[in-house]
Image: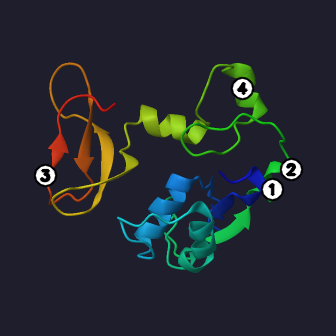
Amino acid sequence: MASPSETPVLSCTACGWMTRCTASDLRSWLLRAGMLRRNSDASFDEMRELLPTAAAKLACPECGIRGLAVAKADEEDAAWPGARRCQSCGQPIPPERLEVFPDTELCAVCQGRVENRIPQPTDEFCPRCGSPMVVRPSHGPGVTRNVLACSNPRCRVGTRGKVK
């Protein structure tokens, strides 16, 4: 596994969005840019080398503007060495949030996505159409459960029941 200083950070210069990329994040971003095949077993270092080229093709998930910037994680980590990281996006959780919610594992942005039931992307792909799968709440009466479903609205592939 790469050290924190080797971990790339993607950011949007237009809206300020930023994320720290783990190996699975790198794979997802490169697949979106069409620079990696689904069955490819590229190493973390190979994917990290491809990211700057792919960043120009990638759109910001917050504002939709194409052309993300790539930086090394150590540039942002200098401000908060040893800070607890969000389990979802890898960003540092601000100390103020940890004072109020000491057991939290998610940053405010990711917690908002969970509470607002926004579909969460996964590293899996639809067996029918090849689109990325997402975890979303089921649409039905009773207890709300999460289902693994295709992100393509025209494809109706979905797995019933709880997602592990």
Amino acid type, callout 3: Arg
Chain-order first, disc 2 or disc 3: 2
Chain-order first, disc 2 or disc 4: 2
Q: Nearer the viewer, mark 2 or mark 4?
A: 2
Q: Nearer the viewer, residue 91 or 114?
A: 91
- Label 2 environment density (alpha carbons within 10 Å; few <14, some 14–19, many ≥20): few
Residue positioned 48% across, 69% down in the render: 30
Q: Nearer the viewer, residue 40 or 64?
A: 40
Distance between mark 2 and mark 3 Cα atoms: 45 Å
Residues at discs 4 and 1 in contact (Cβ within 8 Å): no
Q: Secondary structure at mark 4?
A: helix
Amino acid type, callout 4: Leu
Q: Quadrant of residue 95?
A: top right
Q: Where's residue 36, x and y in %?
A: 43, 72
The tag on residue 60 is none
Q: Where's residue 46, x and y in %?
A: 58, 70
For label 3, the residue is 156
Distance between mark 2 and mark 4 Cα atoms: 19 Å
Q: Nearer the viewer, residue 132 or 48?
A: 48
Considering only vertical position in the picture, is 73 above or below 47? above
Residue positioned 13% across, 52% down in the render: 156
Amino acid type, callout 1: Asp
In the displayed structure image, the side of residue 108 where residue 149 appears, left or right = left
Look at the image and tell me in which quarter the C terminus lies: top left
For label 1, the residue is 74
The tag on residue 78 is 2
Considering only vertical position in the picture, is 164 above or below 102? below
- Label 4 environment density (alpha carbons within 10 Å; few <14, some 14–19, many ≥20): some
